[in-house]
Amino acid sequence: MSNSNAELIERLQQDDVGAFDTLYWQYHEVVYRNILKFTKDPVVAEDILQEVFIKLWEKRSTIKAEHSVAGWLFVISFNLSVNHTRKRLREQVLQKKLAIAEQDNSIQTGTIVYEEQYLLLESAIEQLSPQKRKVVTLCKLEGKTYEEAAGELKISRNTVKEHLQAAMINLNEYIRKKAHIYIIFFLAFLND
């Protein structure tokens, strides 16, 4: 190491800002390039560069004049770059976990809504007369045609159609009246 660096470090240890400025202008470009190679982000590299020189000023009394200040700067810049990269990776992992948890929560919420809707429909069907309940079950839940339902129930196709129309009116009224209770329940459940 040249005498000038040893002298600069000695002056730096005596709180000489001019020595600090000289060291900064002597090494900042090469330290910045090394940080940039590691981080691949100019803004981050500038921030880390500033941290390196802040540490140089803060640790000035512990730096030995006989050691290479360039080596010290590179070690500090490397450590800060590694720390930044680790932090960024942890944040990315956390963001992925949060996104997965949010997606799981959305799926779970969707399942709860579906179950609540199913229970409401099931309750509405239970309120129908036995014959209308059979027609709704056959035509709407099992997907049978009017003819297939008529054959199974031993009634006319037209009677199946009439029962189904009347049942759908009853179901819509029941669900409209009871839906607000389920919405209040569901909102209370979400807030728990």
Image (cartoon, rainbow, N blue to C red):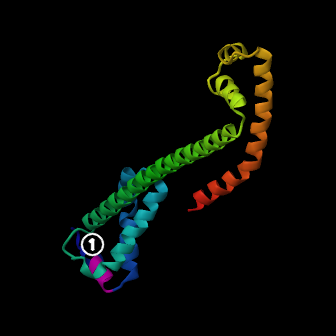
Considering depth in this image, is 164 or 44 the residue closer to the camera?
164
57 w.r.t. 101: above or below: below
Q: How many residues crowd mark 1 within 10 Å: few (<14), some (14–19), many (20+)?
A: some
Which residue is at a point 69% across and 54% down the rendered structure image? 181
Considering depth in this image, is 15 or 8 the residue closer to the camera?
15
Q: Is residue 10 magenta?
A: yes
Going by the image, does 86 lie left or right of 142?
left
Image quarter of the C terminus: bottom right
Going by the image, does 192 lie left or right of 54?
right
- What secondary structure do most residues of the magenta stretch adopt? helix
Q: Is residue 157 magenta?
A: no
| Residue bearing mark 1 | 5
Considering depth in this image, is 177 or 96 the residue closer to the camera?
177
Write down the quadrant of residue 51 in the picture.
bottom left
Considering depth in this image, is 132 or 116 the residue closer to the camera?
132
Q: Position of residue 66 (x, y in %)?
A: 18, 74
Q: Position of residue 44 (x, y in %)?
A: 45, 58
Image quarter of the N terminus: bottom left
Q: Which residues are magenta?
A: 9-14
161 w.r.t. 192: above or below: above
Q: Position of residue 187 (x, y in %)?
A: 64, 57
Which residue is at a point 80% across and 31% down the rendered structure image? 166
> How many numbered marks does the figure carry?
1
Residue type marked 1: Asn
